[in-house]
Amino acid sequence: MKKRRVMLKLSGEALANANGKGYDEAVVRDIARQVKRSVDAGVEVGIVIGGGNYWRGRTGTEIARVKADQIGMLATVMNCIYVSEIFRGEGMETEIFSPFLCGAMTELFSVDKANALFAAGRVLFFAGGTGHPYFSTDTGIALRATELGVDEILLAKSIDGVYTADPKLDPDAKRYDTLTMQEMIDKKLGVIDLTASVLCMENKIPLAIFDLHGDNAIADALRGVIHGTTVTV
Ligand code: UDP
């Protein structure tokens, strides 16, 4: 029987400490324990991590965007090294892939190597986004998900789904249980960027959005139970 294969996206901020920087180790350990249960149950798990706890190419700097984005991509590599190490400490075997060479710190991405390591039960981290400036880790995850034929992309956020409006600003905002990718694009709901949305739509990869901090939310999402919003294609 074909195993369930999913990609989990963690934002950099979700891992950050109370100052919004670096890491909250307890949060990362809890994520690791939830992922381990799913891996032990036979789910193939790929992980993409943003870079917002270190650096964002688009904001807060006057330097050239290309350079700022390079720093952002390296921030995602650092995040993967940290989180991968915590995962290993919790008893999982991992590999970090990147789209550019980082010496012995990561492995250069290849579909064949990734498929072989998924089959061997490793948790795979996809660091460095697409490897190109002017893109995001959203697009990175959509690209890797397409190349590796994943069943679903899981977006663990600091909000428990997609709402009709920002619930912090609008008390009448309602959460969607499901919506289509086309609706998500048309309504400009900002779940993932447009480039990533189009890749997911063209390649028929559904999304799920849920609260990273919800009780067992990650373990449930990894086995297909979503406490949040599902975006169908
Ligand atoms: N980044 C990039 N290309 C990619 C992925 C990421 O240039 O393919 C850079 C970009 O500067 C981005 C940063 O890495 O701001 C962190 O990625 P993330 O997706 O967290 O950025 P966000 O969309 O939150 O700004």
Image (tube, grey):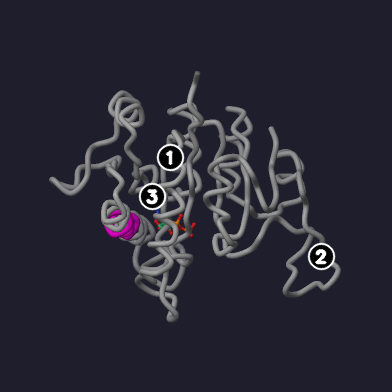
Q: Which residue is mark 1?
A: 45
Q: Type of residue at label 2?
A: Ala
Q: Is residue 15 visible?
A: yes
Q: Type of residue at label 3?
A: Pro
Q: Which structural element holds mark 1?
A: strand
Relative placement, left or right, of 116 versus 155 is left
Q: Earlier in the sequence, mark 3 or mark 2?
A: 3
Residue 16 lies, in percent from the top left, at: 42, 70
Which segment is the magenta one? 75-83
Q: Which residue is mark 2?
A: 173
Residue 222 vs 174, above or below: the answer is above
Image quarter of residue 95: top left
Q: Which residue is mark 3?
A: 133
Q: Type of residue at label 1?
A: Val
Q: Residue at x 51, y 30 (%)?
A: 4
Q: Where ligand 1 lies, by quadrant?
A: bottom left
Instruction: Please tell me whether residue 81 belongs to the stretch shown in magenta.
Output: yes
**Mark 1 C-beta closer than 8 Å to ligand 1:** no
Which mark is in front, 3 or 1? 1
Tags 3 and 2 touching, CB below 8 Å = no
